[in-house]
Image (spheres, rainbow, N blue to C red):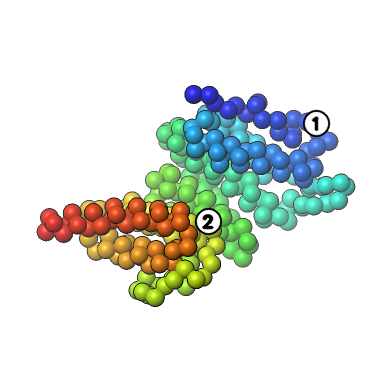
């Protein structure tokens, strides 16, 4: 299998000191890393060494004291941009999530969890920021990847669509859902399924009721609906198995 190494990507920081504070350069650097995570990691064409290199690059962007300019105009103040900070934090978490899939070691897991715990503390002051939901999603994904299922579930529960009531049978997809609300519906159910036991009939029945409510809400979203339907089949089989044994 062919791997993509860091030196195959020409990052802005390699072009000389003069480019280091250019906003377009750092955004290009970020975009290239994101592209690798979005596409090549799914095909397992990125090795652990490359992911560790990316983590180092992203961490350096977080710690450097640089204000970014474009054509001589100040665009981003390092200390004043939560969004800019969140952008690199999310990349770090995504790198760790993919690294855990390759290196299933306590060292990697503990290092990733340390970042997650630090982030959860910092996020308390960012709840009114537009980047907050995306950070919650990334943190939830990290907790799930490291086996902290209950913590993951609580993350996604926080950003579920606020108007959803599990007992409401008249839910429709007329309301437009934000991307993180749709993801929360899927991930929240997945977390509940991951921590339930085959003997916990009430818990699984409650999860199924929630899933059915989300299905009504996601009728206009094909991919998410398909994910829910697959989980619904598994839940019903599980419940049927429990009932058959009683």
Left or right of 18 in this view: 101? left
- The picture quadrant where one finds residue 13 is top right
Q: Which residue is mark 1?
A: 16
Mark 2 to mark 1 CA distance (whole Å): 35 Å
Q: Position of residue 57 (x, y in %)?
A: 65, 36
Q: Secondary structure at mark 2?
A: helix
Name above or below for residue 158 compared with residue 93: below
Is tag 2's residue or tag 1's residue first in the polypeptide sequence?
1
Q: Nearer the viewer, residue 55 or 134?
A: 134
Q: Position of residue 8 (x, y in %)?
A: 65, 26
Is residue 150 visible in the rendered image? The answer is no
In the current view of this chain or complex, which residue is farthest to the right? 72
What is the crowding at mark 2: few (fewer than 14 residues within 10 Å), some, or many (at least 20)? many
Q: Nearer the viewer, residue 152 or 31?
A: 31
How many numbered marks does the figure carry? 2
Tell me what residue is drawn at x 80 percent, y 37 percent.
19
Q: Position of residue 55 (x, y in %)?
A: 59, 37
Name above or below for residue 211 compared with residue 22: below
- The picture quadrant where one finds residue 226 is bottom left
Is residue 62 visible in the rendered image? The answer is yes
Q: Position of residue 107 (x, y in %)?
A: 46, 34
Q: Nearer the viewer, residue 20 or 62?
A: 20
Q: Which residue is mark 2?
A: 136
Tell me what residue is drawn at x 29 percent, y 54 percent.
233
Tell me what residue is drawn at x 65 percent, y 26 percent.
7
What is the crowding at mark 1: few (fewer than 14 residues within 10 Å), some, or many (at least 20)? few
């Amino acid at each position: 299998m062919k791997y993509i190494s860091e030196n195959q990507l020409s990052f802005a920081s390699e072009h000389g000191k003069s480019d280091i504070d250019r906003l377009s350069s750092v955004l290009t650097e970020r975009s290239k890393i994101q592209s690798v995570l979005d596409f090549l990691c799914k095909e397992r064409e990125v090795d652990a060494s490359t992911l560790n290199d990316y983590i180092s690059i992203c961490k350096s962007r977080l710690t450097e004291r640089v204000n970014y300019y474009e054509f001589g105009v100040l665009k981003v103040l390092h200390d004043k941009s939560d969004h800019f900070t969140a952008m690199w934090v999310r990349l770090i978490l995504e790198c760790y999530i993919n690294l855990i899939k390759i290196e299933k070691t306590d060292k990697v897991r503990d290092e990733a969890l340390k970042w997650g715990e630090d982030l959860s503390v910092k996020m308390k002051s960012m709840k009114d920021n537009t980047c907050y939901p995306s950070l919650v999603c990334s943190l939830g994904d990290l907790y799930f990847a490291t086996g902290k299922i209950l913590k993951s579930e609580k993350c996604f529960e926080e950003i579920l669509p606020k108007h959803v009531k599990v007992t409401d049978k008249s839910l429709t997809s007329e309301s437009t859902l934000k991307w993180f609300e749709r993801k929360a519906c899927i991930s929240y159910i997945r977390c509940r399924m991951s921590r339930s036991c085959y003997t916990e009939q009430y818990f699984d029945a409650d999860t199924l009721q929630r899933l059915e409510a989300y299905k009504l809400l996601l009728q206009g979203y094909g991919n998410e609906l398909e994910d829910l339907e697959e989980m619904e089949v598994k839940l019903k089989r599980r419940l049927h198995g429990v009932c058959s044994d009683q």
